[in-house]
Amino acid sequence: MKTKILTIDPIFPEVDRVIQCAKMIRQGGLVIFPTETVYGIAADYTNAKALKRLREVKKRADDKPFAVLIARKEFVDLLSDSADIAAYKLIDEFWPGPLTIVMSGKEPEQTVGIRMPNNLIALNLIYQAQCVIAAPSANLEGNLPPLTCQEALNDLDGLVDMAIDGGSVTVGQSSTVVDLTAPDRKIIRQGPITSEEIERVVKQKVVLFVCTGNSCRSVMAEYLMKRMLGARRDVQVISAGTGAYVTMGASSETLEVLRKEGINATMHRSQPANRTMLKKADLILVMTQTHRRQILDICPTVEKRIYLLKEFAKMSSGSGISLDISDPIGKPKEVYEECVITIKEIVEKVVQLI
């Protein structure tokens, strides 16, 4: 029996056709599909019979594992308990994209290679399948990875249940594979992302400022620190909010006090503090004790990397001075001016330590 072929638009994937293919995967079937790198074969990673069949179709040795694909960055936590900062720096920088990261799995001594592809058909298929997808390239072992659906069918027609024709791939090269479980990070397969790019991202220090809405205090700290760092590229500075549920710009008062410092923050857009962001940060600086508790509720593993910003002012809670930096929202402009002065003095100390 020949493989059933469905043509799907790579820019506006037809949901009904994607769902047909996703249903086949959930039922234990095998589906050829496009990614940005090469065409792959999708199977339910949790289905032992499907994986056995996938291995037989590929003619792959039993000791060679399958990489898995996910549709959202945070889904990595379903597959790995890794607290490796390097992993999350790479995830945030290169996903979705052509980088497979080998991380520690959920079981002792277990490792798993994970990737989030940069292809709308692939992402929709993974999401609709509602499972983790095992996804080797759609070719027999030893043959070149296919760049079109027809190239994949040259090897696999009749051996898999369905195939998605989503046109030619955009990258045309298998993903870079980096093993973070190796002592010194090991490039297992060189692909579109170079070892130099990986080292640049891993070695860059990440400083994250957190307030509530990411519209005033954390914005002041982020932009002040960026200016103080000047041309330095070894530090990345970002900000977020524990209650930033709607994307918005910095408050008008914040823009004004930063303008007086010679800083233009009109392009700032608020963002919520998420697990990937928190796990990639080398240093997390919050404005209040409440923010600290909220961050630890989201991601307990960052406890040793989170500090109150005022701790860097060399004050102690025993001094009788609060370590919180109060929210100026809704208060007179003088409060904003005092806030930016306080934050500026402390951030200068942080910069000296980095």
Image (cartoon, rainbow, N blue to C red):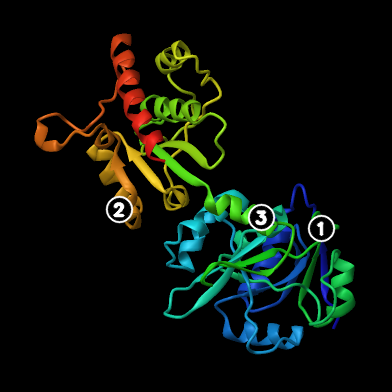
Q: Which three-letter amino acid code belongs to the residue tagged 2?
A: Glu
Give residue 263's position: percent from left, percent from top. 50, 18
The residue wearing badge 3 is: 196
Q: Which three-letter amino acid code belongs to the residue tagged 1?
A: Val
The residue wearing badge 2 is: 303
Q: Which three-letter amino acid code belongs to the residue tagged 3?
A: Glu
Mark 1 Cα shell of 10 Å, populated few (<14), some (14-19), many (≥20):
some
The residue wearing badge 1 is: 169
Q: Is residue 293 visible?
A: yes
Please identify the quadrant where the N terminus is shown: bottom right
- Label 2 to label 3: alpha-carbon separation: 30 Å
Q: Is residue 211 left or right of residue 185?
A: left
The residue at 64%/79% (across/down) is 28
- Label 1 to label 2: alpha-carbon separation: 42 Å
In this orientation, which residue lies closer to the viewer: 140 or 133?
Answer: 140
Q: Is residue 85 left or right of residue 119?
A: left
* Circle 2: element type: helix
Residue at the far front: name it: 352
Classify residue 218 by image quadrant. top left
* Circle 3: element type: helix
Q: Nearer the viewer, mark 3 or mark 1?
A: 3
Instruction: Determine whether 128 is above or below 163 in the image.
Output: above
